[in-house]
Image (cartoon, helix red, strand yellow):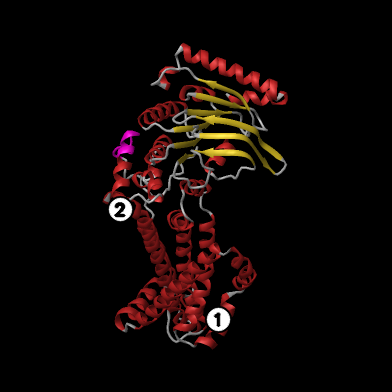
Amino acid sequence: MAAISIAGLTVRFGDVLAVDDLSVDIEDGEFVSIVGPSGCGKTTVLNILTGLVGSTQGRVSLLGKAPVLGNPDVAYMLARDSLLPWRSALENASYGMEIRGVDQASRHARARELLRRVGLAGFEQHYPKMLSHGMRQRCALARTFCLDSPVMLMDEPFGALDAQTKLQLEDLLLQLWTEHRRTVVFITHDLAEAVALSDRVLVMSARPGRVVADMRIALPRPRSVRALQKDRHFLDIYAEVWARLEEGLGSTAPAASAQGEAVE
Amino acid sequence: MKQGAFRIAMPHVIFIVVFLGLWEITMRREWLPETFFGSPSGIAAYLWNGFVTTGKLWLDLGYTVLGTLISFLLGSASALALGLCFVMFPKLERACDPYLTMLNAMPRFALAPLFLLWFGLGLGSKVAVGTSLSFFIVLANTVAGVRGVSADLLVLSRALGATPRQIFFKVTLPSAVPVIFSGLRLALVYSMLGVVGAEIIAAEHGLGQTLAYLQSSFDMNGVMGLLLLLACLGMLVTLGMTRLERALLKWQ
């Protein structure tokens, strides 16, 4: 059974058709990226899975259940770190577990372990203001992996970082994901990031959002995103996905070809 | 450290000494009438007499400080409570808003004669004026602080499964604290202004009452002395609040 199953999903905001008849199945433990120009409805799809937005038409199921807000099966991560500024790194990393009723001793032990894994050992008592952007997002990553949820939904988690920090965090994400295997839905507008991280890349067209390409990424794991940057095979696959993306955008939405350039 | 503090304080000390010296000389040479301006030596003599020789000023100071503290506590506690009610029940806020706006627009010192009639010449009337000022400041800041909570934090907390109660105590309230605090700091200063203002209009005891008396009897050394005292009191109050804020809000 698929971990996530979406069939005929259509979402309207007033007169605007945001997502048009989207269908996709995501296997258990699969790392799937959804790429597309801004405004293509990729965040909407994610918000439907988290239960933040109610679906208007179609069938969506997550581990066999309808999505619901606060589902303990789901861990959620945003582009902005969303750390509570009045809490230390340790208290922030424990925040999700605290909400879900884990007792203090166990949540602190786990948060310490995850902070160490993301390279924030020694920064447990620092407030977010004292941390760099990259460190804050590491802390948010620790908070996300502290949860036992089998499904992780990530909305452009590295979108606001500089290129170097982004590479480091992508590698960190892959390491953590290898250790704590989860089903991941990863939203991004960065095609290279999607190809480097994922088992599968779904390309969405500009509004109304449709899947115009669904590609398996046949790169061996474990991967190093940093090393992949110069890997011929990676560059070939990247070019191929790029071509499929342009082709897909061209055939399904002629008017969107100009916006297609915004994908990169 | 010590060296640095000294270097910062030095220009101020020089400035103050020169200023007071010029003032004193101006009065001694009678370039300006001392009846209108007082003199540093006269002011010092007045304060010495008031605090040390007779000790009479302690009572007035005590009344003013006590009135200020009561106004501050009463005004901010009730404003905090009402502000949180407003956030929980937006309909209540909409219903109350026009009345509160109207009340807040009223010049508080014009109400002082009424308060005097209702609450007498003791602590009651000055506390009423002080409270009527501090209340509105804290109310506005409480509502603004709670409204200003970051949408990202709310979205994340909801997605994690936080209950409304958890969201309120773990996200909304702590994020509102800095804004509420700046309201409290202002409210403390305004409580003092209200209290002194009410005392000037009429009171049994208090720095404001003494100030009005000295003014009407043309004792400029006394007036200047009390103004200096009030300014120092205000500074002390602000400094105390800033210290407290820094200790409580280390994360900022």
Name the residue type under label 2. Answer: Phe
Task: Work out whether A242 lies above or below A169.
Answer: above
- Between marks 1 and 2, how big is the CA–CA gap? 45 Å
Task: Work out whether B227 lies above or below A78.
Answer: below
Bin the neighbour count of mark 1 within 10 Å (Cα to Cα): few under 14, some 14-19, many 20 and up: many
Residue in view at x 55 percent, y 21 percent: A215
The reply to whether residue B237 is visible in this rendering is yes
Front-most of residues B221 and B142:
B142
Q: How many marks?
A: 2
Residue range highlighted in magenta: A113-122
Location of residue B145 in the rendering, given as x and y in whole percent from the top left corner: 51, 57
Name the residue type under label 1. Answer: Ala
Q: Nearer the viewer, mark 1 or mark 2?
A: 1
Residue A56, image quadrant: top right
Which numbered circle lies on residue B9? none
Quadrant for the C terminus of chain A in the image:
top right
The reply to whether residue B24 is visible in this rendering is no
Residue ID for mark 1: B112
Q: Residue furthest left?
A: B2
Location of residue B36 in the rendering, given as x and y in whole percent from the top left corner: 49, 76
Residue B62, image quadrant: bottom left
Task: Work out whether A63 lies above or below B69.
Answer: above
Front-most of residues B120 and A135:
A135
Residue ID for mark 2: B6
- Verify whether residue B242 appears in magenta: no
Front-most of residues A195 and B113:
A195
Name the secondary structure under disc 2.
helix
Q: To which chain does the residue with label 2 belong? A: B
